[in-house]
Amino acid sequence: MPGPTTLPELDVDQEQKTKRQPPYHVILLNDDDHTYEYVIEMLKALFGYPIEKGFALAQQVDTVGRAVVCTTTLERAELKRDQIHAYGPDPRIPRCAGSMSAVIEPAE
C-alpha cells in the first residue's frame, strides 16, 4: 500500500491576493431632468433596492450632487454604469432627453 501523498505547500496569502479584484464605485450624478420617482424606480430595477434606499440615494444625489449606488468589481461596475446610461428618459418630465449619468471610480 503506497504512503500518503504530500502536496506542495501553497502561499495562501499570495493566492488570495491574486484572486481579489480591487473594488470600484458606481456613482450616480445629479441633473435637473429626472424626478425622485425616476431615480427610485431605476435603482429598484437595476440594483433591487427597496423604495426607502432608493429615496435616500435620490436625496443624496439631489443635495450632494452624487451618490455611490454600488461598489463592486470593475467589470460589474462598468455593466451597472452602462445600464444606468441605457435606462432611458424620465416620462414625467417632457424636456428629459435621456438617462441619468454615472461614472465609475476606484474605491479607496
Image (cartoon, grey):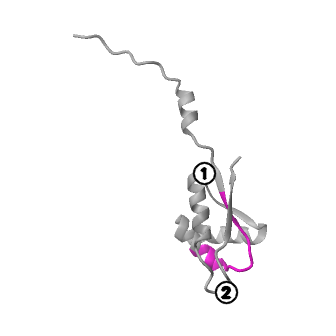
Q: Position of residue 61 (x, y in %)?
A: 72, 69
Callout 2: 10 Å neighbours few (<14), some, many (20+)? few
Q: Which residue is mark 1?
A: 74
Q: Amino acid at mark 2?
A: Ile
**Number of the label disc, if any, that sits on residue 24:** none
Dividing the picture into quadrants, the one containing residue 25 is: bottom right
Quadrant the N terminus occupies = top left
Quote the CA–CA distance across marks 2 and 1: 32 Å
Q: Hey, which residue is sitting farthest right in the picture?
A: 64
Task: Name the residue rendered at 63%, 87% in the picture.
Answer: 92
Q: How far across and down, in percent of the image, does residue 27 sit?
A: 68, 61
Q: Is residue 104 above or below residue 96?
A: above
Q: Which residue is mark 2?
A: 93
User: At 66% across and 72% down in the image, what residue appears?
Assistant: 100
Task: Residue 14: give x, y in percent of width and height.
Answer: 57, 28
Q: Secondary structure at mark 1?
A: helix
Query: Which residues are the magenta region?
Result: 26-41
Quadrant in the picture for residue 88: bottom right
